[in-house]
Amino acid sequence: MNERFVKHATFVVERTYKAGAGRVFEAWADPEVKGKWFSKPDQFEFRVGGREYSSGGPPEGPVFTFDSVYQEIVQDERIVYTYTLDMNGTRMSVSTTTIELFVVDGGTKLVFTEQGAFFDGHDTPEIREHGTGEMLDALGKLFE
């Protein structure tokens, strides 16, 4: 029998974009825009209590399922959601994510904070933090 364990972790990733807070917020709120830098959602209800769901992956690769519920939305300032991430039907993690937007000279500073429970070594906070950085870099390409 494999050892079962939970690793709890919090990480913060920050980026500054040359775009107004409204544009950065829209990139999270509009499913067409979000689909350009994040997985294209199968279901998308951007409202408190709404669900975002996507499932897929590379050809002949694992299937990842992202299932989230929006907990708080403050226009152009903050988005908070909880989510699960599964790979081929195995739960990898459960997280709470907070996106904060701050107006700065020349653009918007985004602060992404994730508090997660990572299960049985299927994923690690370090890998997730790295992937989050790449995801936020992809978001930044929209504003170049």
Image: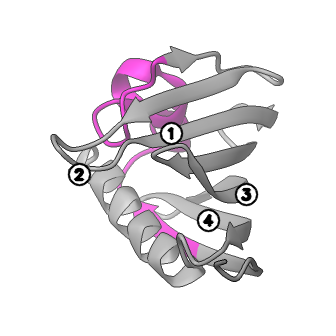
Name the residue beneath numbered marker 1.
Answer: 65
Return the residue nearer the eye: 56 or 1. Answer: 1
- Residue under label 4, please give it: 111
* Mark 4 → mark 1, Cα distance in angstroms: 24 Å
Mark in the foreground, 4 or 1 = 1
Q: Mark number for residue 95?
A: 3
Which image quarter: residue 76?
top right
The residue under label 2 is 141
Q: Position of residue 78 (x, y in %)?
A: 73, 45
| Badge 1: residue crowd in 10 Å (few <14, some 14–19, many ≥20) | many
Q: Is residue 139 positioned above or below 73 on the image?
A: below
Question: Callout 4, which amino acid?
Answer: Val
Nearest-to-viewer mark from 3 and 2:
3
The crowd level at tag 4 (other Cα within 10 Å; few <14, some 14-19, many 20+) is: some
Image: 48 above or below 8: above
Q: Tell me the distance, in whole angstroms, between the alpha carbons under discs 3 and 2.
A: 26 Å
Give whichever of discs 4 and 1 has the lower sequence position: 1
Q: If you read the primary sequence from the N terminus, does the residue marked by circle 3 or circle 1 appear first? A: 1
Residue 66 on image: x %, y %: 54, 40
Distance between the Cα atoms at labels 4 and 2?
17 Å
Q: Comparing marks 3 and 4, which lies closer to the viewer?
A: 3
Residue at (61, 63) in percent of width and height: 112
Q: Are marks 1 and 2 in contact (CB under 8 Å)?
A: no
**In the displayed structure, does residue 39 sit left or right of residue 47?**
left
In the image, the segment drawn in magenta is 13-42
Which of disc 4 and disc 3 is earlier in sequence? Answer: 3
Q: Cα distance, mark 3 to mark 4?
A: 16 Å
State whether residue 90 is above or below residue 43.
below
Q: Nearer the viewer, residue 126 or 108?
A: 126
